[in-house]
Amino acid sequence: MKHPATEARRSGQSPPVVPHVDVTLTVNGTAHALRVDARVTLLDALRDHLGLTGAKKGCDQGACGACTVMVDGKRVVACLVLAAQCEGREVTTVEGLSPDGGPHPVQAAFARHDAFQCGYCTPGQIMSAVCLLAEGRAGTDEDIREFMSGNLCRCGAYPNIRAAIRDVTGER
């Protein structure tokens, strides 16, 4: 397959211009003015432009949940959202869950129940769990399993993750 920029150079034409956009992202309560390629995802803006590396790049296709963050209180996979789409919206990452510096109750429960394993998926799992609890969808283990199904764990820590979520609800 021929790359358009390479073909343009060979033919003496200028390569296509990539548009940039100015965007102000409010992340964890702080506004950040950025100039980014219009195609930059929220995940890449968080990691590469703001240094917030909690959200992980897993599949880059929205299937694994490693990049889960909250936008206006709802969970999203940040690899499928453009940074420019988040102008005027509140983005919360795992780094911003607990503004007082201590662990969020879900983070503490993950530690108590050894729900970390390798830790790669943990930030996305935690963000999904926080939203699941806020949505009131942690009624049964089956509910938890269903509403956490978008977050994959290669280590198989699912029973411990469910136990951590049940712990936060007060049911063990």
Image (cartoon, rainbow, N blue to C red):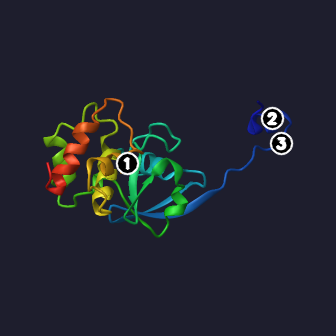
Does dot 2 land on a helix, a strand or a loop?
A: helix
- Extreme residue in the right direction: 11
The x, y position of residue 139, in whole percent, is 26, 56
The disc, 1 or 3, on the residue closer to the chain's N-terminal end is 3
Question: Which residue sits at x=37%, y=64%?
Answer: 73
Question: Can you name the residue that lies furthest to the bottom here?
Answer: 88
Foreground residue, 111 or 41? Answer: 111
What percent of the width, then of the height, locates residue 157? 27, 34
Q: Is residue 85 above or below residue 152?
A: below
Label 1 belongs to which residue? 146
Q: Are marks 2 and 1 in contact (CB under 8 Å)?
A: no
* Between 68 and 84, the one nearer to me in the picture: 68
User: For the residue labelled by badge 3, is the local secondary structure a helix, a strand or a loop?
Assistant: loop
Q: CA distance from mark 3 to mark 2?
A: 8 Å
Mark 1 or 3: the one toward you: 1
Q: Are marks 3 and 2 in contact (CB under 8 Å)?
A: no
For label 1, count other residues whose C-alpha is less than 10 Å away and answer few (under 14), some (14-19) or many (20+).
few
Q: Residue at x 60, y 55 (%)?
A: 38
Q: How busy is the neighbourhood of tag 2: few (under 14 within 10 Å), some, or many (20 plus)? A: few
Residue 13's disc number: 3
- Which mark sits nearer the N-terminus, 3 or 2? 2
First along the sequence among labels 2 and 1: 2
Q: In the drawing, what numbered circle is on residue 103? A: none
Q: Quadrant of the N terminus?
A: top right
Read off the residue under disc 2. Answer: 7
Q: CA distance from mark 2 to mark 1?
A: 48 Å
Q: Where does the image place residue 62, in percent across and percent down from the top left?
A: 50, 45
- Which one is in front in this view, the residue at disc 2 or the one at disc 1? 1
Q: Is residue 162 visible?
A: yes
